[in-house]
Image (tube, rainbow, N blue to C red):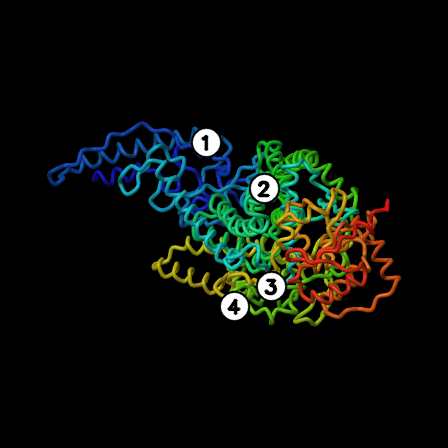
Amino acid sequence: MTPAESRALSAPHPDAAGPDETVSHHTRTASRTRAVGAPGGSAAPAARVGAGVRTAEPKTEPRTEPEPRTEPERRTEPERRTETENETARGTATASTAVAAAPAEAPPAAPAESPTAPPAEATPAGVPVEAAPGGVPLEATPGAVPVEAAPAGVPAEGDGDDAEGDGAPRPRRWARWIRWRQHLAVGALFLLAALWVTSRIWLDPAGRVASLYTGDPAQVQFFLAHSVRVVLHGEYPFYTEQFNYPDGVNLMANTAVLALGIPMVPVTLLFGPAVSFVVLVTLGLAGTAMAWYLVLRRHVVRTPLAAAAGGWFCGFSPAMLSHASWHPNIISQFLLPFIVWRVLVLTRSRRPVRDGALLALLVTAQAFINEEILLFTALACGIFLLAVVAQEPVRWRAAWRPLAVGLAACALLAGALLAYPLYVQFAGPMAYHGLSDAVQDYGNDIAAFFAPGSATLGGNQRANVNLAPNYSEENAFFGWSLSLLAVGVVVWLRREMVVRALAATGGFFALLSLGERISWWDRELITGPWELLVHLPLLDAVVPTRFGLITTVIIGLLLALAVERAWELRPADRRTVRTLTAAGLAFALLPIAPMPLRMVSRPPVPEFITADRWRAYVGPDQTLVPIPVPSMGNTHGMRWAAATNLDFKIPGGYFLAPRNGNTGDPGRFGGRPSGVGQLLEEVATTGRTPKLDDRQRRRFTDELRHWHAAILVLPVRQQHVEPLRRTVEELVGPGRQELDVWVWDVRTLTDRSV
């Protein structure tokens, strides 16, 4: 026997886990051996990979390698027989040691490559094998943590200080540096893509806005300025009277984005709320993509391209691009991957109280970004876990106890942290219950799932006009290519339990996103299941079309798993398979590639405001009344107030409040109906000057007194400025021009003492 043959006989099986190795779900051969007593068979011995527990190999005595012979080896038959017997004795000793170390009741496992034993069902790739309490193995547990694999030629963590790569030792620090370089490269790609999407607004943050629905950016800028007052002046964070004076606005019942606005206070002070808005949009897109990439790369897949593809779609999907122009609170989903992961970790946690506390901190932070997205995340986790248990009920026996303890700890801590803010939201001043019927009926058209989004390379804004409630709510729009690819991935990987659970979750929320009436190309077909849920508590404040955001994330996860499985194939020509995988991604994602957001110019904040000339007129308990009065369709006055960090109060505005200002009523956009406000808004829209009588003048005076108005301000660059100026003069008398505005001093009309 040659020295090479001698070493081959004593070498461990390639599927065995050595003392410095961890068992990964990516090793398909190791998953073929099942343990006795597990339903359908389980890996034996089951390894808790997520916690980093390694399977131990029996220790053997070190053996000195025989010296290579310089002459041709010529041995007699007795010599070869003696050497064979020695090798057999050593193998027997090693085997006896392994048997002694194994549990007594465990039967000997069949060889993994035995041609006679029928192969058991392989563990779904992408899910590790984990030992459950009580000896019940949990395969494919949603929260199981696979070991992160290092790039080819790079030693993985836990392999010791040095690992052999290409025959030379490489330190673990160098492996980590390689991995961090990959992360930095992917993060830079995502940041460049986000800058590309927001490039047009970056040219002039204060002077450019999305082409439609300019109210949302103005509202967010107002909330960012409110965060400045919270930090610098200690102002009450959950309620304000700086707009909709004197009734005020319940900020907890609106999207006040305190968790985003407070960290952005330095930027808002230095550059203004308009710049902070663009920064939030840019970081929201890139940060969400990067967060999903990191979670996928570390816990779900080992191929960088798979994690990058999943993260890219979760961060730059058509739905995210649709909200980017208006709703930074919705696209800031960078906490969601970690919330989902911590929920799944609870299903196998050995320290559920600690893990529940960590989850509570994430939940609390997300509640101050967007509560609706947090609710969606909770519902999605629940449906996914139900789908898993429905397929393999035995998992429930091992998972329910740590899950229940962890969720209880999370509920206690998060409840304590959020108890008062939630009290203000649901029972405080200007609280409302439910949304208007028009918003509750927002739903996707079935055709919306097959059309590309308006903000994408293949998108057509005119073609999508009847497929979504409006352009800011295009929450599907995957395009034909990606929709077909997603269905194909589910069919291809249908044997994997996790894929089936993901498909069920995505399909369920896609159905809910159709709203109360399911339609095809704007033609109503049948009544949807959402009609049965729309009046339930919490769900009555949900916009149903946004359930499509959950389906978007599910498709991103399916893309990551599909790329990972394609990369794991071992055909004769691997290069061809990988080329076809990249081509498939391009085929699916290129039609919905992100394009720069459409922007239009908007009038600047008047110099009368920025030069503080208004301070000579407006006192602490008085209001500056912009003309037209701020409302959902006229939010320029909110931008004026935000530019001064809310140093003056305004009436009206764009927000959610109870109807007629009565706490507890269903919600509506705007405060109490204003007759004069509606009159001026009509003049600003049509340019026609109405005929006024004494009754309308008295009503306008009463409203000015209710608002504690000090001055009325009309910019000279306002559209239809002359009809508006004549209308106001008929109501309160002549005004005068100061800098770039018309000013009417009405303090003598509104001062009750006079």
Q: Residue 89 vs residue 512: left or right? A: left
Q: Residue 116 vs residue 553: left or right? A: left
Label 1 sits on a secondary structure element that is loop
Q: Residue 81 vs residue 380: left or right? A: left
Contact between marks 1 and 3 (CB within 8 A): the answer is no
Tell me how far mark 3 sits from mark 2, CA to CA.
27 Å
Tell me how far mark 4 sits from mark 3, CA to CA.
19 Å
Q: Quadrant of residue 30?
A: top left
Amino acid under disc 2: Val
Residue 748 visible at all: yes
Pair 2/4: label in front: 2
Residue 265's label in the rendered image is 2
Q: Nearer the viewer, residue 82 or 715?
A: 715
> If you read the primary sequence from the N terminus, does the residue marked by circle 2 or circle 4 appear first?
2
> If you read the primary sequence from the N terminus, does the residue marked by circle 1 or circle 2 appear first?
1
Q: Nearer the viewer, residue 170 or 210?
A: 210
Residue at label 4? 458
Mark 2, Cα crowd under 10 Å, few <14 / some 14-19 / many 20+, is many
Contact between marks 3 and 2 (CB within 8 A): the answer is no
Q: Residue at x 25, y 36 (%)?
A: 84
Pair 1/3: label in front: 3
Residue at label 3? 211
Residue 79's label in the rendered image is none
Q: Residue 7 vs residue 45: left or right? A: left
